[in-house]
């Protein structure tokens, strides 16, 4: 089945540790995105990538890093510099950036203790 | 700055009634809009989209209306059902390379 997969679904980390969230898609989509969602809030764009080996900062990139070494993978690292990392993280992909429907994964809920 | 927002954070409707969820956008250059539905603890699901060369588009029980003059988007759900209870987001294409999401509206359906 084609789709976009995020893992793990729940993640717990100690404060000060870096953590990497996985996002894989087998839809052959060029564009991939990371969003952050806080309780009762909308989605805020962290990073996005239009093509392999290229990515751009979104609205809240500070404290996060990404890589796009393969078309199907777009991992997000939450670094210790992120002041409030506890949130629900959503990955999405689309055929073309912004002008076509984006398909979402089921999210990773990160809790930092 | 650029923003996509919603007028009503929570909308309560009776089962069987029609629902209307509104969205205002500020970027007059945006040319593509999507409505998503998000159930608790899950990722958003595509409902319907519309391009700026249209002012109305219909799907199954849903209709999206686009008014470019006042930069307003709405989602109409006919005969609302309990399964429609969720948070609804509009998203706007910005500079052709990313989607920016609004705050969201929670739709509550009561019997």
Image (cartoon, helix red, strand yellow):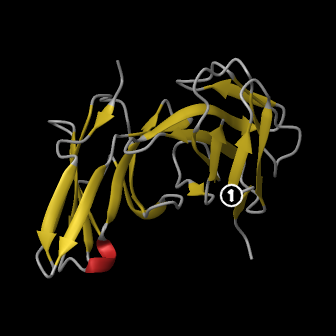
Q: Which chain carries label 1?
A: A
- Total numbered circles: 1
For mark 1, give the secondary structure: loop
- Residue sitting at 24 percent across and 80 percent down? B81
| Residue B61: % across, % down | 26, 77
User: Which residue is the extreme one toward the right?
Assistant: A69
**Residue at (55% x, 38% y) in the render:** A36
State which quarter of the image contains the N terminus of chain B.
top left
The answer to whether residue A52 is left or right of residue A83 is: right
| Residue B20 sits above or below residue B23 on the image | below
Res. A75 visible in picture: no
What residue is drawn where x is 49% and y is 29%? Answer: B95
- The crowding category of the residue bearing disc 1, from other C-alpha atoms within 10 Å (few below 14, some 14 to 19, many at least 20), is some
Query: With A57 as the anchor, is B42 left or right in this view?
Result: left
The x and y percentages for residue A47 are: 64, 31
Quadrant of residue B3 within the rendered picture: top left
Measured from the top left, where is residue B83 in percent x and y?
33, 78
Q: In this view, does B73 lie to the left or right of B40?
A: left
Report the residue marked by disc 1. Answer: A9
Q: Nearer the viewer, residue A27 or A82?
A: A82
In depth, the one of A89 and A70 nearer the eye is A89
Q: Residue B41 versus residue B89: which sits nearer the camera?
A: B41
């Amino acid at each position: 089945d084609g789709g976009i997969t995020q893992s793990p679904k729940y993640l717990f980390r100690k404060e000060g540790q870096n953590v990497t969230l996985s996002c894989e898609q087998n839809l052959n989509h060029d564009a991939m995105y990371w969003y952050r969602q806080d309780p009762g809030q909308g989605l805020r764009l962290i990073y996005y990538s239009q093509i392999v080996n290229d990515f751009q900062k979104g609205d809240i990139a500070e404290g996060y890093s990404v890589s796009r070494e393969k078309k199907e993978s777009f991992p997000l690292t939450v670094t210790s510099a992120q002041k409030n990392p506890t949130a629900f993280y959503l990955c999405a992909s689309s055929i073309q950036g912004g002008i076509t429907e984006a398909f979402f994964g089921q999210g990773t809920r990160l809790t930092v203790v | 700055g650029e923003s996509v927002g919603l007028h009503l954070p929570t909308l309560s409707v009776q089962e069987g009634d029609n629902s209307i969820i509104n969205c205002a956008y500020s970027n007059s250059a945006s040319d593509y809009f999507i409505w998503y539905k998000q159930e608790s603890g899950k990722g958003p699901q595509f409902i319907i989209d519309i391009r700026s060369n249209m002012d109305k588009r219909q799907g199954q029980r849903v209709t999206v209306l686009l008014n470019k003059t006042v930069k307003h988007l709405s989602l109409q759900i006919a005969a609302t059902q309990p399964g429609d209870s969720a948070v609804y987001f509009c998203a706007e294409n910005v500079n052709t390379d990313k989607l920016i999401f609004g705050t969201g509206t929670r739709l509550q359906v009561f019997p």
